[in-house]
């Protein structure tokens, strides 16, 4: 499940997931019928409008052993929000389909550590890196230290702590649009902490958050590059 933002803006992240999983012996398919996970609609209160989107999701991903996505927010939507939408719809068939598909959706680090049982994926990335745990991965999914455990096993990588790492970056999807001033203020705090960490690279599991933080870093000419976790784990040279 590539997600909307990766499909539209960061295709290299999606390609990195496929490269990584195939290197680990996983038989990867990309259902061309996939669209949005419906998170923007649900988060903004349009649950009825999300019904056909959730219906399309379960149709595209039914029958697979696992659905892997490089996004804590989209994985969280599928695992926790789809059932709300389905039950609100009153469609028993949709409820059953969601109950079948949703538990099989995994954020990338969850799949690697919990399903495949690996922390060393054979990656090489000779840079100093700091990790930002995104809100949905941290709070909704509870991925915990899985991304850090994966990063700690990357050859050549130096992982430095991010001050106040658990604080939100301020993006929040539509929150950044509707509450721009607050979003920017929160982002400024996050960027200050990123710069204080002294890393070359900021890594996270969601490109949405990296877009927000990366934009602020760029405007400050901070010299810190935002890179998705999948792209680091897929790197071998």
Image (cartoon, grey):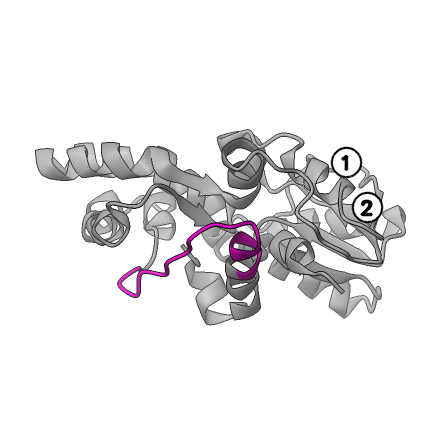
Does residue 79 appear to the left or right of 162 in the view shown?
left
The reply to whether the magenta stretch includes residue 37 is no
The magenta segment: 19-34
Where 116 falls versus 52 (above or below)? above
**Residue 119: % across, % down:** 66, 38
Q: Quadrant of the N terminus?
A: bottom left
Closer-to-camera residue (158/37): 158
**Label 2 CA crowd tier, 10 Å (few <14, some 14–19, many 20+):** some
Where 185 falls versus 137 (above or below)? below
Q: Quadrant of the C terminus?
A: bottom right
**Label 1 CA crowd tier, 10 Å (few <14, some 14–19, many 20+):** few
Residue ID for mark 2: 193
Place residue 167 in its image quadrant.
Answer: top right
**Residue 164: % across, % down:** 77, 36
Closer-to-camera residue (5/175): 5
Q: Quick one: label 2 or label 1, which is nearer the N terminus?
A: 1
Residue ID for mark 1: 164
**Residue 60: % across, % down:** 25, 54
Does residue 35 appear to the left or right of 226 in the view shown?
left
């Amino acid at each position: 499940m590539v997600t909307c933002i990766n499909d539209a803006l960061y295709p290299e992240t999606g390609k990195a997931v496929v490269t990584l999983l195939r290197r680990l012996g996983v038989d990867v398919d990309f259902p061309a019928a996939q669209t949005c996970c419906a998170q923007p609609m649900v988060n903004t209160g349009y649950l009825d409008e999300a019904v056909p989107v959730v219906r399309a999701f379960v149709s595209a991903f039914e029958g697979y052993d696992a659905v892997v996505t490089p996004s804590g927010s989209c994985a969280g939507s599928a695992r926790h929000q789809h059932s709300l939408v389905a039950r609100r719809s009153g469609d028993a068939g949709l409820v059953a389909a969601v109950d079948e598909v949703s538990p099989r959706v995994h954020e990338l680090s969850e799949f690697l550590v919990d399903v495949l049982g690996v922390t060393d994926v054979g990656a090489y990335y000779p840079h100093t890196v700091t990790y930002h745990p995104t809100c949905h991965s941290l709070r909704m999914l509870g991925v915990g230290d899985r991304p850090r455990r994966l990063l700690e096993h990357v050859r050549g990588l130096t992982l430095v702590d991010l001050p106040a790492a658990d604080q939100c970056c301020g993006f929040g999807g539509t929150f950044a649009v509707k509450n721009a001033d607050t979003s920017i203020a929160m982002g400024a705090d996050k960027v200050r902490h990123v710069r204080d960490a002294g890393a070359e690279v900021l890594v996270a599991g969601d490109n949405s958050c990296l877009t927000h933080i990366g934009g602020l870093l760029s405007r400050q000419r901070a010299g810190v590059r935002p890179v998705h976790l999948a792209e680091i784990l897929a790197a071998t040279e």
